[in-house]
């Protein structure tokens, strides 16, 4: 269950990163509200996962999921560039996250 909590935390991590973009320097009240709520939920689910998963592993996976989600949504929502090297390096991140999961012992 801890890994599910960590996945949920990572999704909310992505949500607040994207919300921050839409918040426009906290001028957009709705996006700012979503961002704050997503931050709180992300931290809450991260804290639940930490009952079982080691902090170093959980934190790396949490931020990795957030980075991966922001990368993908940046491409889809904001037309950020897609090129070989960006895909290559995000693939390394995915491999690293899978490696952390498989060697965590949890």
Image: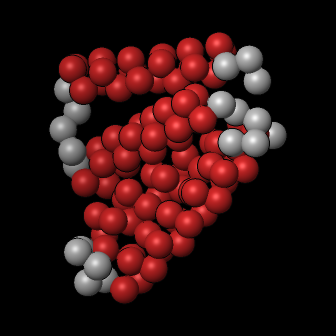
Relative to 9, say whether 56 is above or below.
above
**Quadrant of residue 68 within the rendered picture:** top left
Residue at x-position 44% and y-position 61%: 16
Residue at x-position 56% and y-position 66%: 40
Relative to 18, say whether 89 is above or below.
above
Quadrant of the snapshot with the C terminus = top right
Relative to 71, say whether 25 is above or below.
below
Colouring method of the image: secondary structure
**Quadrant of residue 31 within the rendered picture:** bottom left
Q: Nearer the viewer, residue 16 or 45?
A: 45
Report the number of numbered marks.
Answer: 0
**Rendered location of residue 98, percent (x, y):** 57, 20
Query: For this view, does 94 lie left or right of residue 80?
Result: right
Query: For this view, does 27 lie left or right of residue 45?
Result: left
Please say whether residue 4 is visible from this viewpoint.
no
**Rendered location of residue 7, percent (x, y):** 63, 42
Residue at x-position 76% and y-position 36%: 52
């Amino acid at each position: 269950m801890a890994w599910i909590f960590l996945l949920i935390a990572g999704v909310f991590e992505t949500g607040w990163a994207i919300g921050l973009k839409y918040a426009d320097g906290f001028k957009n009240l709705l996006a700012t509200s979503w961002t704050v709520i997503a931050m709180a939920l992300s931290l809450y689910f991260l804290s639940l996962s930490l009952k079982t998963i080691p902090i170093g592993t959980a934190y790396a996976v949490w931020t990795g999921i957030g980075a991966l989600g922001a990368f993908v949504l940046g491409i889809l929502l904001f037309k950020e560039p897609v090129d070989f090297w960006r895909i290559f390096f995000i693939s390394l991140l995915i491999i690293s996250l899978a490696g952390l999961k498989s060697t965590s012992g949890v």
